[in-house]
């Protein structure tokens, strides 16, 4: 049986740009207050796979970039931001039909830079970890 995000309390994240619409939808579920208070999800599909039949690493990195970027964006009250650095570690394979959940936490925030970490899981098993730095644009 295919996982149904809606019946599990997830909603499609609004404001997804053209690229995200091509790879998504990305789902969101509020779990607590603050920028890191939401979990994000992606239902892995056949179109997300590589030649080995598992979700392509680039798709997992795309998810990490979007999710951590949205958390940063919330932390800086929706000021324009850009990814400076994003490091990903692939821990386990993801198959079509898996629902990938991603959560993050801001490690450090300065006036112009935000340092953040995230973890993607499938059924509570870690499949990817990520660390990134985002720049708040227009701030030196």
Image: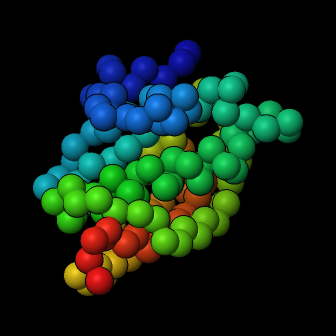
The reply to whether residue 69 is visible in this rendering is yes
Name the quadrant of the N terminus: top right
Residue at the right extreme, as displayed: 51
- Percent of width and height locating residue 128: 58, 58
- Residue ID at (54%, 68%): 86
- Residue ID at (29%, 32%): 14
Q: In front here: 94 or 14?
A: 14
The image quadrant that residue 8 belongs to is top left
- Residue ID at (27%, 39%): 29
Residue 37 sits above or below residue 96 on the image: below
Residue at the top extreme, as displayed: 1
- Percent of width and height locating residue 97: 60, 27
- Percent of width and height locating residue 76: 20, 65
The image quadrant that residue 104 belongs to is bottom left
- Residue ID at (85%, 38%): 52
Residue 22 sits above or below residue 75 on the image: above
Along the horizontal axis of the image, is 126 left or right of 35?
right
The reply to whether residue 123 is visible in this rendering is no
């Amino acid at each position: 049986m295919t996982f149904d995000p809606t019946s599990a309390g997830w909603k499609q994240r609004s404001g997804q740009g053209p690229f995200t619409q091509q790879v998504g939808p990305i789902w969101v579920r509020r779990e607590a207050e603050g920028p890191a208070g939401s979990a994000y999800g992606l239902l892995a599909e056949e179109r997300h796979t590589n030649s080995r039949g598992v979700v392509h690493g680039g798709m997992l990195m795309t998810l990490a970039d979007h999710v951590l970027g949205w958390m940063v964006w919330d932390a800086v009250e929706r000021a324009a931001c850009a990814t400076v650095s994003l490091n990903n570690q692939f821990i386990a394979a993801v198959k079509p039909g898996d629902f990938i959940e991603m959560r993050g936490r801001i490690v450090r925030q300065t006036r112009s830079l935000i340092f953040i970490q995230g973890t993607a899981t499938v059924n509570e098993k870690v499949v990817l970890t990520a660390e990134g730095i985002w720049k708040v644009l227009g701030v030196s």
